[in-house]
Amino acid sequence: MNPIHFFTLGFFPEYIVMGIILGILIGIYTLFRVKYSLNDSNLSKNKQIIISSIIAILSFLFCLNIWSMGAILIFYLFISSLIADLIRIIQKYLIKEKHLNFIPKIHKKGLLAIIIFTIIILGSVYGMNHIELTEYNLTTDKIDNKSYSILFISDVHYGTVQNTQLVKDSILKMNNLKPDIVVLGGDIVDERTTKESMQEIFEELGKINSTYGTYYIFGNHDKQPYTSDYENGNRTFTDSDLNQSIEKNGIKILNDDKIIINNDIVLVGRSDAEWEDSINRTDVNEILNESDLSKYIVVLDHQPVEYEDNAQEGVDLQLSGHTHGGQVFPYGMIYNLSGRLNYGEYEIKDMKQIVSSGLTGWGWPMRNEAKCEYVLININ
């Protein structure tokens, strides 16, 4: 991995204020924590202050871009150190000093924090390299004497942060499910996906056998709109390249469009809420007509938005991705506290909303919130 990419991961200047606030908090803590660790060293007071200050300043600088690998590593080191401090307080005041008497020494030297940090990082790397099937069972009275299975795959971000062979192996497992319908929910590729990798992933996804075909909607990354935030600064493939690769592999693009499947299911694919001139994107009620309401209506929208409007229009199921279930702490917690839909199954009036955490992840090659998944929805 390119070291510049590893520590910067783009710039995203609109988040600089958050980075400054985080950097100040962690920088101040780092200053005093490193100085505390150096108290018993043979270094002079001046050298202790200089070393502590340099490490604190570096911590602050890494935090300026909150989306960078450097920021997340510094943040987890900070969290690990706080946990180590808490363990030391419990050992000192709630447990007799003669018990666990090795803790003060490894805490002061920072070894306890390093151990906790290592556990967090190893667990997070495992989380990014372990893909699971998640299954939902839904019922409806709109379909008589038949059931359908929908395989939902989103947020693959192919060729960026996850082993590509792991993705291919997962696709083989998906094929064994023999789904009726396959849905690709956007962000299958992103700004760091090469043209060759883009062509490869759609070829692989096109191999999934299904009764009624594979359908695709655009996510906010697929057309590589964020190239200015990345090292190469240029797109690696054009819109035409992307569309041709999708369609060449038997995958149908739904972009504010619908298709009726077996006269039972209406599949509505939305343009992404952030792109495709989202302010003017077509309303669901303009895509649907009165005869559609007697059928089972599934809306595919990369981002979990407009779900209340869709429920009001009589939609039965909305499938979304985008959030990654947070992917790394504390982003999922922030999503949940803000009241936004983050991960799992929700019920809005008579409509079900399912938000997938995605097959892979974005940016960081690790995951410790939600899981990497592909989703099977059984409609009975």
Image: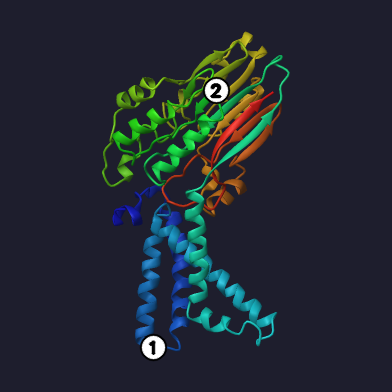
Q: CA distance from mark 1 to mark 2?
A: 68 Å
| Snapshot quadrant of residue 276 | top left
Name the residue at the right extreme: 141
Q: Vertically, is 175 above or below 9?
A: above
Q: Vertically, is 141 above or below 318?
A: above
| Snapshot quadrant of residue 315 | top right
Q: Position of residue 215 (x, y in %)?
A: 48, 22
| Snapshot quadrant of residue 7 | bottom left
Name the residue at the top extreme: 291
Front-most of 260 and 299? 260
Local SS, label 1 = helix
Q: Position of residue 41 (x, y in %)?
A: 41, 88
Local SS, label 2 = strand
For the C terminus, the quadrant is: top right
- Measuring 34% from the left and 25% from the top, which residue is drawn there? 245
Name the residue that disc number 1 marks.
45
Front-most of 158 and 234? 158
Q: Position of residue 258 (x, y in %)?
A: 52, 16
Q: Position of residue 97 (x, y in %)?
A: 65, 86
Specify the amino acid type for callout 1.
Answer: Lys
Front-most of 106 and 249? 249
- Measuring 65% from the left and 14% from the top, which residue is drawn there? 295
Name the residue that disc number 2 marks.
181
- Measuring 35% from the left and 74% from the top, which residue is drawn there? 54
Residue 25 visible in this rendered orientation of the protein: no
| Disc assigned to residue 140 | none
Q: Is residue 113 left or right of residue 263?
A: left
